[in-house]
Amino acid sequence: MNHHQTLAKNYGAPAFNAVRGDGLYLYDESGKRYLDFGSGIAVTSVGHSHPKWVHAVQAQAANLVHCSNLYGIPGQQKLADRLVAKAGPGRVLFCNSGAEANEALLKLARLHGKQRTSEEGKRYTVIGAENAFHGRTFGGMAATPQEKIQGGFRPMLDGFKFGQLNRIESFDRLVDDSVAAVFIESIQGEGGIFPAEPGFLRELRALCTERNALLMLDEVQCGIGRSGHFFAYEASGILPDAIGMAKGLGGGFPIGAIWVAEAYAELFQPGSHGTTFGGNPLACAAANAVLDIIEEEELLEKVRANSATWHQDIQTLANKHSEHIAGIRGAGYMVGLALKPEGLNLKIANAAREKGLLVVPAGQNTLRMLPALTANPEQLSEAVAILDEAFANVER
Ligand SMILES: *Cc1c(COP(=O)(O)O)cnc(C)c1O
C-alpha cells in the first residue's frame, strides 16, 4: 500500500489496513487472518480484545473517563499499590507513553543531582548504553545514541554519555561526580533484543550505590511479564532506584508509569511534574484489567513454562537454517533472531506476513517475536513452522 494522502510520512507505507483483533489474531480489510507475534510492538500483552479487558474498559467508559489529577482517582491509587507491591516500597507517577515515562525518569535524575550538590546544573550527566532506544522526545532521543533517531534534530539535550552494555569497565570509567544516573534497558528492544546480563546488572547496581548515582531501568518493552518475570531485571535479583514502564501495561490503551524507590520518592513534590491525561480513570481501568488477567491466568508462570519448549523449537529452527540464523537472544516471550546477510530480517518479516505471521524487524538485522503473554504452545509452534517456511522460501 502507499501512504495515505493526508497522513504524515514519518512511518513507512503500511502493508495492510488492520481492522479487527481477537486474541492472538489480527485481521485485515480483506478478512485475512494473521498470527500476531508483534502485538503492536509489545503492547497487547493479554491479546487483542480479551473479554475481561473489554468489559473493564467498557464499564469504566460508561462511568467516568477523565477528571484530571486535580481529583483523586481510585483506580489510579489501586494500580499504584499493585505496582509498588511488584517493584518494592516507593511511589508511582503516571503518564501516557514510554517516552513520557523516560522523560519523567530523566527529570528525576536532575532532581537527584541537584539534591546531591545542593546546586542546580552541576550534577546532571546520565550514562546510557550504546545501541539503546528510549523514545522520540528530546530526552529520549538524547539517551538514544543512534544516527537514525538523532539525525535532523540536533542539537541534542546536553549531558549524556554512553557505556557498552555488559561491559562494566566502560560504565566504571564514566560514572564520576558529574553523574546523576545510569539509565539502561533491562533488555534492549529496538536495538535488537540484547539482554543486560544478571552479573552485569549486579555490578552496575553496586557501582551506582557506591557513587551515589541513580540506577534507572527502562522496562517499557521488556516489562509487564514479557520476560517471564513481571520486570525483566528480577532475573538478576537486584533492586533498581527507578523504573520506566508503558507498552504492555495498558494492554493496548495508552498508559505509562514510573516507579521510584522510597529513598528517592520525595524528589517529586507538588507542582514539580505532571501531565493532563496521566493515569486517568479509563487508562487505569485498562491497566488494572491487564494485571488482573496476568494474575488470574497465571501468565508469568505460563510464559516461563511455554518458553522452555518454544526456545528449543527456535534453536532447532536456527540449526536447520544456520546459513541465515546467526544466533538467538532474549527471554520469555521476547525473542530476537540474529540474521545474515544484512537486510534479511525485512525479507523474512515480509515472507512471514504473506504466510500469515506478523513479526517485527529490529536493529542489527534482528527479527523480533513479541507474542501476547496469552500465546499458547500451539500458537508458539505454529509461528516457528511459518518461519521455517519463510526461511525455506528465501533459501530456494
Ligand atoms: C517503545 C519504547 C520506548 C518509547 O515508548 P513510546 O510509547 O513509543 O513513547 C522507550 N523505551 C523503550 C525500551 C521502548 O521499547
Image: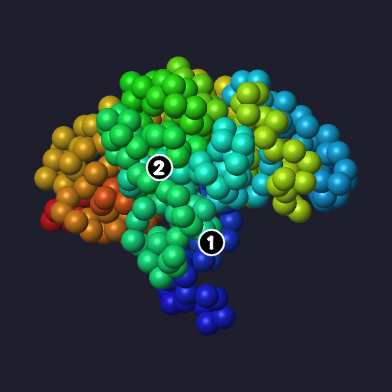
The answer to whether 26 is drawn above or below residue 12 in the figure is above
Q: Nearer the viewer, residue 273 or 253?
A: 273
Give residue 21's position: percent from left, percent from top.
Answer: 57, 51
- Write down the residue under mark 1: 18
Identify the element where label 1 is drawn.
Answer: strand
Q: Distance between the residues labelled 1 and 2?
A: 36 Å
Picture layout, residue 174 above or below residue 205: below
Number of the label disc, if any, that sits on residue 128: 2
Residue 175 in the image, given as x and y percentages of width and height: 39, 34
Residue 100: horizontal and vertical position, in percent? 60, 50
Other residues around mark 2 within 10 Å, as few (<14) / some (14–19) / many (≥20): many
Residue 173 versus residue 296 in the image, above or below: below
Amino acid bearing label 1: Ala
Task: Check the image and name the residue furthest to the top.
Answer: 237
Residue 315 in sight = yes
Residue depicted at x 46% and y 44%: 125
Q: Which residue lies furthest to the bottom in this view?
A: 5
- The residue located at (86%, 46%) in the rendering is 70
Which residue shows up at 70% across the image and 31% down it?
Answer: 266
Disc 2, SS: strand
Q: Foreground: 341 or 311?
A: 341
